Image (cartoon, grey):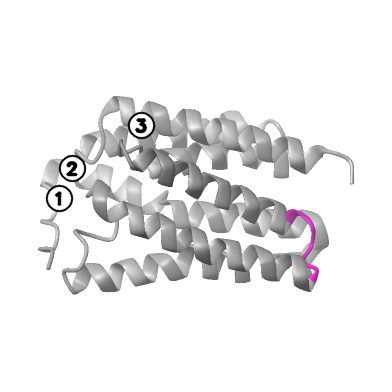
Amino acid sequence: MTSPAAPAPVRARPAALVAEVFAPAPLVLCLLVLAGWRSAGWTGVLWGLGTAVLVASLPMLVLRVLARRGMVDGHVVRSRAQRLPVYAATGVLTALVLAAELRLGAPVLVPVTTAFVLLGLLVLLALTLRWKVSAHVAMAACWAVGLGALTAPWAVPLAAPVLVLVALSRVRTGDHTPGQTVAGALIGVLIGLADTAAVISPG
């Protein structure tokens, strides 16, 4: 059994708050809702919300329960070894949700966005076999780029400070090294750009 993580030192609490507010789950929800809205208005929003509940909110809820029971070292899962089954299980769940979306005829940008969430999970899973790259920073970078594709290009520079804050917060709390945050940012930007290309491509 894993002991619950100790509370963050007072000096690190603002950084921990940044990591909570801009955690992957709410950023995934934001992108999926925007993708749904752009595809099919309020009907698409419902698809985006439903997808986000399954692929982001549900895994986070499960992690919080596991953390309370001492089965993982915290809901952010600091241990690299413990992250592997988390990424794998979330990836399987996301793949099943994606298959259901395609089967049920979800508005096109919702499964497109879900597919890139799955891609991000698979990349993080592969890298985590050897190195603990920051998933927070990867998702923040993907969100910043994806926001521009789903709204307007000027949204990217407005969202960029969030990426910087998240990266600094992950180093400040001691969860990642600067190199791990830079790697996360590069992964997120690349996946965000690929998502952008899919969003703006005809048909």
Question: Of helix, strand and loop, which one carries label 1?
Answer: loop
In contact (CB < 8 Å): disc 1 and disc 2: yes
Q: Nearer the viewer, residue 12 or 200?
A: 200
Instruction: Report the mark closest to the observer, 1 or 3.
Output: 3
Residue at 58% x, 31% y is 190
Q: Where's residue 38, x and y in %?
A: 78, 54
The three-letter amino acid code for the residue at tag 1 is: Ala
Residue 12: image tag: 2
Q: Where's residue 87, x and y in %?
A: 41, 55
Residue at the spot of label 3: 181
Q: In this view, does 114 lie to the left or right of 28?
A: right
* First along the sequence among labels 1 and 3: 1
Residue at the spot of label 1: 8
Tell me the CA gap for discs 2 and 3.
Answer: 17 Å
Tell me the CA gap for discs 1 and 2.
Answer: 6 Å
Tell me the CA gap for discs 1 and 3.
Answer: 19 Å
Picture quadrant of residue 157:
top right
Q: Which of 133 and 43 is in front in this view?
A: 133
Question: Of helix, strand and loop, which one carries label 2?
Answer: helix
Residue at 51% x, 31% y is 160
The three-letter amino acid code for the residue at tag 2 is: Ala
Q: Could you classify mark 2 by the number of other residues whose Cα lies within 10 Å: few (under 14), some (14-19), or many (20 or more)?
A: some
Quarter of the picture holding the N terminus: bottom left
Which residues make up the magenta segment? Answer: 105-109
Q: Where's residue 27, x and y in %?
A: 51, 51
Instruction: Report the mark closest to the observer, 2 or 3.
Output: 3
Q: Could you classify mark 1 by the number of other residues whose Cα lies within 10 Å: few (under 14), some (14-19), or many (20 or more)?
A: few
- Secondary structure that dominates the magenta span: loop
The three-letter amino acid code for the residue at tag 3 is: Thr
Is residue 103 placed above or below 136 in the rendered structure?
below
In the picture as drawn, the residue positioned furthest to the right comes out as 203
Q: Which of 107 and 22 is in front in this view?
A: 107
